Image (cartoon, rainbow, N blue to C red):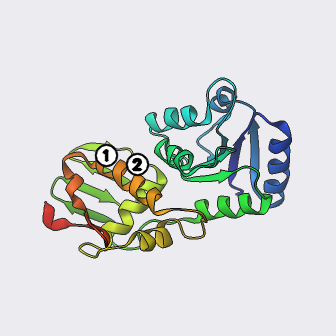
Amino acid sequence: MAQKILIVDDDPVIGEVLEYNLANEGFQVTCAHSAEEALKKLTPLHALILLDVMMSGMSGYKLAEKLRREKNQIPIIFLTAKDTEDNMLEGFSAGGDDYISKPFSVKEVIARVKAVLKRQPSSGPSLLVVGGLTIDFRLKELIIGTEKIFLTKTEFELLSFLADNPQRIFSREDIIEKVWKDTPFITERTVDVHITRLRKKLGEHASLISSRPGFGYRFNVAKT
């Protein structure tokens, strides 16, 4: 079955161009011209959202934040003319999985869509239990005590990668190569932003992810 993509952009020309080219790549495409319309059209069958940032009404960032608050893990790729590093980090902080600056080439968008959709977390054991924390790699869930903790797709992939290799230190470059492979223009600060968000969600278990200045990050089971 073809994967379904929701394009959200208030520029109908951009929407039509992306719809035509993604359909030619075998995707099923739905278009929305506002965040409010996107909320009506988004279904559990959609595999990814291409989301414009600057729209009248609700912005793309606000839509992403709303979806993440509702524990919707659908991957989000932002499309925006706001192209500074701070803008990019704001997008990731809002729950985005990737960020493409306008103007862009259609080939780049297609490549980034395919890269996000093919990411696969953890090839190791199906379950990891550390103290009161459980990572279910098969169901892609993080459970602390009896509570399921919502993680975005990228956050879960990052946690899975580190947890698969306890006590080994990974540089930011190592993490980018594994978690964001085939996704260009990812910076080391992007890794730091995601680590910070992940630690916050780990709560009292935040020390499981430790850092060593000048070297990188590790999943440190000795901290439990």
Quadrant in which the N terminus is drawn: bottom right
1 or 2: tag closer to the N-terminus: 2
| Amino acid residing under circle 2 | Leu
Relative to 34, 169 lies left or right: left
Mark 2 crowdedness (10 Å alpha carbons): few <14, some 14-19, many ≥20: many
Q: Is residue 204 above or below residue 188?
A: above
Nearer to the camera, 167 or 163: 167
Instruction: Name the residue at 41% across, 56% down.
Output: 156
Residue 110 vs residue 99, the one in the foreground: 99
Q: Which is nearer the eye, 111 or 81? A: 81
Please tell me the numbered disc located at residue 201: 1
Q: What is the three-letter code of the residue carrying label 1?
A: Lys
Q: In this view, does 199 lie to the left or right of 78?
A: left
Q: Which residue is drawn at 45% across and 63% down?
A: 188
Q: Would you call the spot at circle 1 few (<14 residues within 10 Å), some (14-19), or many (20 or more)?
A: some
Q: Nearer the viewer, residue 90 or 163?
A: 90
* Secondary element type, mark 2: loop
Can see residue 164? yes
Would residue 44 appear left or right of 164 to someone viewing this image? right
Q: Position of residue 142 (x, y in %)?
A: 32, 52
Place of residue 129 in the rendered image (x, y in percent of width and height, measured from the top left): 22, 61
> Which mark lies nearer to you, 1 or 2?
1
- Residue at the far top in the pictured view: 57
Whole-percent x, y for residue 104 in the image:
76, 55
Compared with 175, 78 (above or below) is above
Quadrant of image for the C terminus: bottom left
In the rendered image, is residue 137 in sight?
no
Q: Are marks 1 and 2 in contact (CB under 8 Å)?
A: yes
Rendering coords of residue 135 (x, y %) = 30, 58
In the image, is 85 to the left or to the right of 112? left
Q: How far apart are marks 1 and 2 (CA)?
A: 8 Å
- Numbered badge on residue 151: 2
